[in-house]
Image: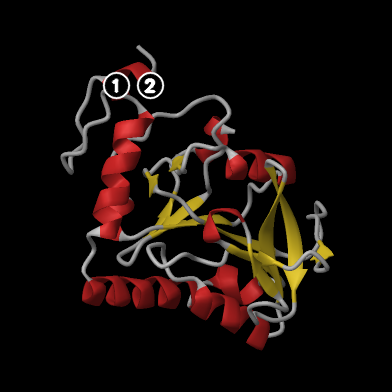
Amino acid sequence: MNQAIRAGRQRLQNGLPIGGGKGPLRQNLLARRRALPAEQRAEQNAAIVRRIRDSARWRTARTVVAYASLPEEVDTWPLLQAALREGKKLVLPRIERRDIEWHAVTGLARGSDLTEGPFGILEPAPAAQRWRPVPGDEPVLWLIPGVGYDRCGTRLGHGAGYYDRALRGAQARRNSVGLAYSCQLVEIIPAAPWDWPVESVVTPDEWIVAANPSDRR
């Protein structure tokens, strides 16, 4: 029996049903994230930022590929600011048609450096320099958003496939890190062949190196 069938017949340890596929799981996880009290959210954000910045991956990265977080997501703004302050190249996603393109930014000013894109997400202005990873080039740290993760690095997104396509196109294997509040980590996320997992998941409590992530790529 394959993993997806097994997952469809189980209930996660934290009580989230996944028998109906990804949709019910996604809605449950989004509701849990929305319900996170402001004080806990702030504490967990600070812990995740500390864990990232204290890591060897952060220290050695010359380029940080991240995202401008929405209010309910793990707060990346301290990391974006730190990357620029420390002289790292900062790369953010920009949605063009139905795909993500990566662009380097030198500032975070709304209206000049960043403009509002689809779904209300701030993204690099159209004039920002396009960036593409070069295999074997300078160390890159990928900070990836998600609705949920499991310990195999399986990522649950919003369902449109933007990140799966973009990460696969960039072959973002090494140093790909999903950021998650504690309530976003679950036992099993059903995986499809086109899903692109992350190498690690960082929560407020731990840095999880995914179990056999190469088996899922």
The residue carrying pointer 2 sits among few (fewer than 14), some (14 to 19) or many (20 or more) residues within 10 Å by Cα, namely some
Tell me the quarter of the image containing the C terminus. Answer: top right
Residue 4 has which mark?
2
Asked whether the viewer can see residue 134, the reply is: yes
Residue 41: x, y in percent? 29, 71
The furthest residue to the top: 1
Q: Is residue 92 above or below residue 13?
A: below
Image quarter for residue 115?
bottom right
- If the image is split into quadrants, where does the N terminus sit? top left
Question: Can you give x and y, in whole percent of width and height, for residue 150 in the image?
Answer: 37, 43
Q: Residue at 66% x, 48% y: name it.
A: 172
**Looking at numbered disc 1 in the image, what kind of residue is underneath it?**
Gly
Residue marked by disc 1: 8
Residue at x 35%, y 75% (from the top left corner): 47
- The residue carrying pointer 1 sits among few (fewer than 14), some (14 to 19) or many (20 or more) residues within 10 Å by Cα, namely some
Cβ atoms under marks 1 and 2 closer than 8 Å: yes
Q: Residue furthest bottom?
A: 85
- The Cα–Cα distance between marks 1 and 2, rounded to whole angstroms, is 6 Å
Residue situated in front as seen by the camera: 123 or 181: 123
Q: How many marks?
A: 2
Choose between 172 and 24: the one closer to the eye.
Answer: 24
Compared with residue 72, is residue 118 higher up or lower down, i.e. above or below? Answer: above
As helix, strand or loop, the secondary structure at mark 1 comes to: helix
Drawn side of residue 37 relative to residue 27, left or right: left
Amino acid bearing label 2: Ala
Can the viewer see residue 186?
no
> In this view of the protein, which residue sits in the foreground, 28 or 118?
118
User: In this rendering, would 159 be left or right of 132?
Assistant: left
Instruction: Give me the residue at 51% from left, 76% from top.
Output: 77
In the displayed structure image, the side of residue 1 where residue 193 appears, left or right:
right
Tell me the SS state at disc 2: helix
Residue at x-position 45% and y-position 44%: 153
